């Protein structure tokens, strides 16, 4: 378990796909941002603005980045990066707890 | 939208009911604690240790506190308190975003 100290948290959740994906925004003193979220099983495509580092804390999903043809399995303890102004699709197999860092 | 500044957030989610209810813990400088969470539709019974103030930010649920026989509808913008060492059951009708404050 780890903690982020000295941060600001937005009370209201970010809700996607009717709540099947939901996250809370954490703002850091250096101006950076992370979201802490939960994904229910299902298939979801997200577009990126900034590049993102997705850390999967628990759960299991299949990942396809934009331009890829295959899928790769990502499990708890693994992470992946998504380029800026791109997209990625996840087939979430078991409820996934994640930490998404928005990269400068 | 509101924010909690100068707090500590636990990175890993609290997962209940196979992730149908999940929350993130926020720790305040005064030692108090809140959790920010999301509930998928379904029926859930929780036991309390400390008394709790549950603020429903969005969504809709039917609530029954321990010892009650009926149900009352709670919607976004409404809240309810649960006594210490008690329990409550929620029938969540639409995905609910909540803020739970643990009362001293």
Image: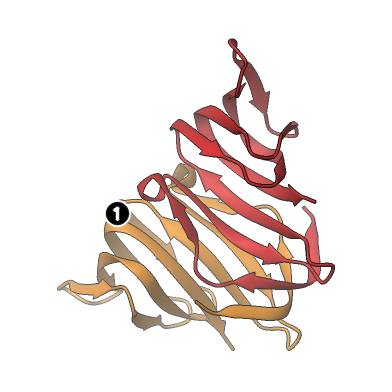
Chain colours: A red, B orange
Binning the other alpha carbons within 10 Å of mark 1 as few (below 14), some (14 to 19) or many (20 upward) gives some
**Residue A1 showing in the rendered view:** yes
**Residue B87 showing in the rendered view:** no
Left or right of A52? Residue A12 is left
Q: Position of residue B71 (x, y in %)?
A: 18, 71
User: What residue lies at 27% left-to-right and 73% top-to-bottom?
Assistant: B75
Q: Which residue is mark 1?
A: B43
| Number of residue marks | 1
The extreme right residue here reads: A30
Instruction: Chain letter for mark 1, please.
Output: B
- Which image quarter: residue B35? bottom right
- As drawn, B24 above or below A39: below
User: What residue lies at 32% left-to-right and 73% top-to-bottom?
Assistant: B76
- Which image quarter: residue A42? top left
Residue at disc 1, secondary structure: strand
Left or right of B7? Residue B74 is left
- Which image quarter: residue B14? bottom right
Q: Position of residue A57 (x, y in %)?
A: 69, 41
In front of the other: B31 or A91: A91
The extreme front residue here reads: A85
In front of the other: A3 or B85: A3
Q: Position of residue A65 (x, y in %)?
A: 62, 24
Left or right of B97? Residue B10 is right
The extreme top residue here reads: A70
User: What residue lies at 44% left-to-right and 55% top-to-bottom?
Assistant: A15
- As drawn, A95 above or below B44: above
User: What residue lies at 22% left-to-right and 77% top-to-bottom?
Assistant: B68
Left or right of B90? Residue A1 is right
Q: Position of residue A93 (x, y in %)?
A: 50, 26
């Amino acid at each position: 378990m780890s903690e982020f100290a000295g941060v600001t948290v937005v009370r209201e959740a970010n809700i996607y796909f009717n709540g099947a994906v939901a996250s809370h925004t954490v703002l850091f003193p250096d101006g950076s941002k992370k979201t802490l979220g939960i994904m229910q099983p299902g298939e979801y495509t997200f577009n990126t603005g900034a590049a993102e580092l997705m850390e999967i804390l628990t759960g299991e999903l299949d990942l396809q980045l934009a331009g890829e043809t295959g899928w790769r399995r990502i499990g708890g303890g693994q992470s992946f990066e998504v380029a800026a102004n791109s997209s990625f699709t996840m087939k979430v197999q078991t409820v996934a707890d994640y930490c998404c860092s928005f990269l400068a």
